[in-house]
Amino acid sequence: MKVRFIAGIVCPKCGAQDSVRIYIPEQGEVDEQLRDCVTCGHEERIGQGTAARQEMTTRVNHTRPTAVQEVEPQVLKLK
């Protein structure tokens, strides 16, 4: 098995970024991938067919609530 870290992925359990590694099976091994978080130890087992269809959460596609509030523009008078 090959072990690789996945850049930009967010752990679904603890939310840590860049701490998830993936175990990729080589030729002749079981057709299944294992992902685990080095921070909290969370593990996911994914079949090869499912892994190809499921998009992983990264910094780019991860949505967070924004702290920006809509504010009415105000006119300022300078003296």
Image (cartoon, rainbow, N blue to C red):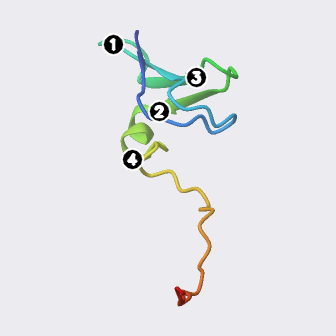
Q: Amino acid at mark 1?
A: Glu
The span from disc 4 to disc 1 (Cα, nearest Å) is 20 Å
Please state which of the two labelled residues, at mark 3 or mark 4, is closer to the viewer.
3
The mark found on residue 36 in the picture is 3
Question: Which numbered disc flags the more N-terminal residue, 2 or 4?
Answer: 2
| Image x and y of residue 13, in percent | 69, 36
- Amino acid, disc 4: Arg
Q: CA distance from mark 2 to mark 1?
A: 14 Å
Circle nearer the N terminus (3, 1) = 1
Element at label 3 = strand
Location of residue 72 (image quadrant):
bottom right
User: Looking at the figure, which quarter contains the N terminus?
Assistant: top left
**How many other residues sit within 10 Å of disc 1, few (<14), some (14-19) or many (≥20)?**
few
Residue 78, horizontal then vertical, whole percent = 52, 85
Pick the front one: 38 or 66: 66
Q: Quadrant of the C terminus?
A: bottom right
Q: Is residue 38 above or below residue 71?
A: above
Q: Nearer the viewer, mark 3 or mark 1?
A: 3
x 51%, y 32%: residue: 46
Q: CA distance from mark 3 to mark 1?
A: 18 Å
Q: Amino acid type of disc 3? A: Asp
* Percent of width and height locating residue 60: 41, 48
